[in-house]
Amino acid sequence: MEALSADGGSVPPSSLDAVPPYIMHSFSPNMVGLQDVVGSNASALNWIVRYPAGSPLILSMVDSGGHQGGVEAQYTVVAGSTNACLPQPVATTFQVTANATILNTCDALKLSISGGKKPYTLSVLITDISEDTVMMGPNDDQFTWINKAPPNTTVLVSAQDA
Protein backbone atom coordinates (compact mmCIF):
# COMPACT_ATOMS: atom_id res chain seq x y z
CA MET A 1 0.00 0.00 0.00
CA GLU A 2 1.15 3.54 -0.56
CA ALA A 3 1.12 6.80 1.35
CA LEU A 4 -1.55 9.32 0.43
CA SER A 5 -0.99 13.05 0.75
CA ALA A 6 -3.46 15.89 1.00
CA ASP A 7 -2.25 18.75 -1.19
CA GLY A 8 -3.34 22.38 -1.13
CA GLY A 9 -6.83 23.75 -0.91
CA SER A 10 -6.93 23.48 2.86
CA VAL A 11 -8.61 25.95 5.16
CA PRO A 12 -6.30 27.34 7.87
CA PRO A 13 -6.92 25.40 11.09
CA SER A 14 -7.50 28.59 13.10
CA SER A 15 -10.60 29.40 11.03
CA LEU A 16 -12.12 26.03 11.94
CA ASP A 17 -10.95 25.95 15.55
CA ALA A 18 -9.12 22.75 14.63
CA VAL A 19 -6.51 21.52 17.08
CA PRO A 20 -3.51 19.64 15.63
CA PRO A 21 -2.41 16.92 15.39
CA TYR A 22 -5.01 15.45 13.03
CA ILE A 23 -6.18 11.84 13.24
CA MET A 24 -7.52 9.69 10.40
CA HIS A 25 -10.14 7.14 11.42
CA SER A 26 -10.38 4.35 8.85
CA PHE A 27 -13.01 1.64 8.82
CA SER A 28 -13.69 -1.39 6.66
CA PRO A 29 -16.60 -3.79 7.26
CA ASN A 30 -15.62 -6.90 9.27
CA MET A 31 -12.11 -5.57 9.88
CA VAL A 32 -10.45 -3.70 12.74
CA GLY A 33 -10.92 0.08 12.54
CA LEU A 34 -7.68 2.06 12.73
CA GLN A 35 -6.77 5.50 14.06
CA ASP A 36 -3.57 7.09 12.75
CA VAL A 37 -2.01 10.49 13.42
CA VAL A 38 -1.57 12.08 9.97
CA GLY A 39 0.26 15.26 10.91
CA SER A 40 0.01 18.70 12.46
CA ASN A 41 0.14 20.86 9.33
CA ALA A 42 -3.33 20.91 7.72
CA SER A 43 -1.70 21.58 4.33
CA ALA A 44 0.59 18.52 4.47
CA LEU A 45 -1.15 15.48 5.95
CA ASN A 46 0.11 11.96 5.17
CA TRP A 47 -1.62 8.65 5.72
CA ILE A 48 -0.54 5.10 4.90
CA VAL A 49 -3.30 2.71 3.81
CA ARG A 50 -3.07 -0.39 6.01
CA TYR A 51 -5.89 -2.43 4.50
CA PRO A 52 -5.57 -5.15 1.84
CA ALA A 53 -6.41 -4.47 -1.80
CA GLY A 54 -10.12 -4.79 -2.51
CA SER A 55 -11.20 -3.58 0.95
CA PRO A 56 -14.07 -1.09 1.02
CA LEU A 57 -13.00 1.84 3.18
CA ILE A 58 -14.73 4.71 4.98
CA LEU A 59 -12.53 7.55 6.21
CA SER A 60 -13.14 10.21 8.83
CA MET A 61 -10.79 12.98 10.01
CA VAL A 62 -10.78 14.39 13.54
CA ASP A 63 -8.51 16.81 15.32
CA SER A 64 -6.94 16.20 18.72
CA GLY A 65 -9.78 18.15 20.34
CA GLY A 66 -12.28 15.61 19.00
CA HIS A 67 -13.71 17.97 16.35
CA GLN A 68 -14.93 15.90 13.43
CA GLY A 69 -14.05 17.04 9.93
CA GLY A 70 -16.53 14.97 7.94
CA VAL A 71 -16.92 11.47 6.56
CA GLU A 72 -16.02 10.91 2.95
CA ALA A 73 -17.77 8.55 0.54
CA GLN A 74 -16.71 4.91 0.49
CA TYR A 75 -13.41 4.10 -1.22
CA THR A 76 -11.96 0.81 -2.46
CA VAL A 77 -8.30 0.03 -1.73
CA VAL A 78 -6.19 -0.82 -4.79
CA ALA A 79 -2.93 -2.76 -4.77
CA GLY A 80 0.22 -0.75 -4.09
CA SER A 81 3.89 -1.53 -4.51
CA THR A 82 4.07 -3.43 -1.18
CA ASN A 83 1.87 -4.89 1.52
CA ALA A 84 4.54 -4.69 4.26
CA CYS A 85 2.53 -2.08 6.18
CA LEU A 86 -0.49 -4.37 6.70
CA PRO A 87 -1.07 -5.23 10.37
CA GLN A 88 -0.85 -8.86 11.39
CA PRO A 89 -4.21 -10.49 12.18
CA VAL A 90 -5.05 -10.51 15.88
CA ALA A 91 -6.86 -13.47 17.46
CA THR A 92 -9.75 -12.09 19.51
CA THR A 93 -13.17 -12.98 20.85
CA PHE A 94 -14.28 -9.33 20.60
CA GLN A 95 -17.47 -9.21 18.53
CA VAL A 96 -20.25 -6.79 17.60
CA THR A 97 -23.59 -8.14 16.38
CA ALA A 98 -26.53 -6.15 15.03
CA ASN A 99 -30.20 -6.96 14.62
CA ALA A 100 -30.26 -5.72 11.00
CA THR A 101 -28.09 -4.97 7.98
CA ILE A 102 -30.68 -2.88 6.14
CA LEU A 103 -32.35 0.05 7.91
CA ASN A 104 -35.06 2.52 7.02
CA THR A 105 -34.71 6.08 8.26
CA CYS A 106 -35.78 6.22 11.95
CA ASP A 107 -35.38 2.43 12.43
CA ALA A 108 -33.62 1.21 15.58
CA LEU A 109 -30.33 -0.61 15.18
CA LYS A 110 -29.75 -2.82 18.23
CA LEU A 111 -26.12 -3.68 18.89
CA SER A 112 -24.67 -6.32 21.22
CA ILE A 113 -20.98 -6.41 22.08
CA SER A 114 -19.11 -9.32 23.62
CA GLY A 115 -15.50 -10.13 24.48
CA GLY A 116 -12.74 -7.61 24.88
CA LYS A 117 -12.63 -5.31 27.89
CA LYS A 118 -15.34 -2.89 28.99
CA PRO A 119 -16.08 -0.03 28.70
CA TYR A 120 -16.70 -0.04 24.97
CA THR A 121 -16.65 2.93 22.59
CA LEU A 122 -18.86 2.96 19.49
CA SER A 123 -18.27 4.96 16.32
CA VAL A 124 -21.22 5.43 13.98
CA LEU A 125 -20.24 6.74 10.55
CA ILE A 126 -22.72 8.03 7.99
CA THR A 127 -20.96 8.56 4.65
CA ASP A 128 -20.85 12.15 3.42
CA ILE A 129 -22.38 13.33 6.71
CA SER A 130 -20.79 12.60 10.10
CA GLU A 131 -19.11 10.37 12.63
CA ASP A 132 -20.61 10.08 16.11
CA THR A 133 -18.75 8.58 19.04
CA VAL A 134 -20.58 6.98 21.96
CA MET A 135 -18.82 6.08 25.21
CA MET A 136 -20.73 3.20 26.80
CA GLY A 137 -21.07 2.72 30.55
CA PRO A 138 -18.67 0.46 32.47
CA ASN A 139 -21.15 -2.45 32.57
CA ASP A 140 -22.98 -1.88 29.26
CA ASP A 141 -22.80 -4.38 26.41
CA GLN A 142 -25.89 -3.36 24.41
CA PHE A 143 -26.75 -0.15 22.61
CA THR A 144 -29.66 1.02 20.46
CA TRP A 145 -29.00 3.61 17.75
CA ILE A 146 -31.79 5.34 15.84
CA ASN A 147 -30.99 5.67 12.13
CA LYS A 148 -30.88 9.39 11.26
CA ALA A 149 -29.27 8.81 7.87
CA PRO A 150 -31.06 9.76 4.68
CA PRO A 151 -32.21 6.91 2.39
CA ASN A 152 -29.53 5.16 0.28
CA THR A 153 -26.71 6.22 2.60
CA THR A 154 -24.01 3.90 3.93
CA VAL A 155 -23.84 3.57 7.72
CA LEU A 156 -20.96 1.80 9.40
CA VAL A 157 -20.77 0.99 13.12
CA SER A 158 -17.47 0.12 14.76
CA ALA A 159 -16.71 -0.74 18.38
CA GLN A 160 -13.49 -0.45 20.38
CA ASP A 161 -12.81 -2.00 23.75
CA ALA A 162 -10.89 -0.39 26.64
Image: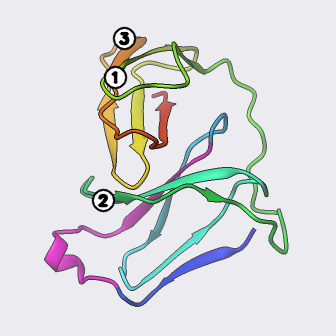
* Magenta part of the chain: 10-28
Q: Earlier in the sequence, mark 3 or mark 2?
A: 2
Residue under label 3: 140
Percent coordinates x, y for residue 131 in the rendering: 35, 46
Label 3 packing within 10 angstroms: few (<14), some (14-19), many (20+): few
Q: Is residue 1 above or below residue 95?
A: below
What residue type is disc 2 on?
Ser
Q: How is the image coloured?
A: rainbow
Between the C-alphas of marks 3 and 2, the distance is 26 Å
Vertical placement of 41 versus 107: above or below? below
Which is more foreground, mark 3 or mark 1?
Answer: 1
- Which residue has dot 2 on it? 64
Q: CA distance from mark 3 to mark 1?
A: 14 Å
**Which badge, 2 or 1, comes first in the chain's sequence?**
2
Residue 72 percent location from the top left of the image: 45, 60
* Quarter of the view holding residue 140: top left
Quadrant location, the N terminus: bottom right
The residue carrying mark 1 is 145
Q: Nearer the viewer, residue 154 or 68?
A: 154
Give me the residue at 16% from left, 69% from top.
17
Tag 3–tag 1 contact (CB < 8 Å):
no
Viewer-side residue, 14 vs 11: 11
Q: Secondary structure at mark 2?
A: loop
What is the three-letter code of the residue carrying label 3? Asp
- Residue 88 image position (x, y, % from top left): 78, 45
> What count of labels does the image hold?
3
Specify the amino acid type for callout 1: Trp
Secondary structure under the numbered disc 3 in the rendered image: loop
Disc with the residue nearer the chain's start (3 vs 1): 3
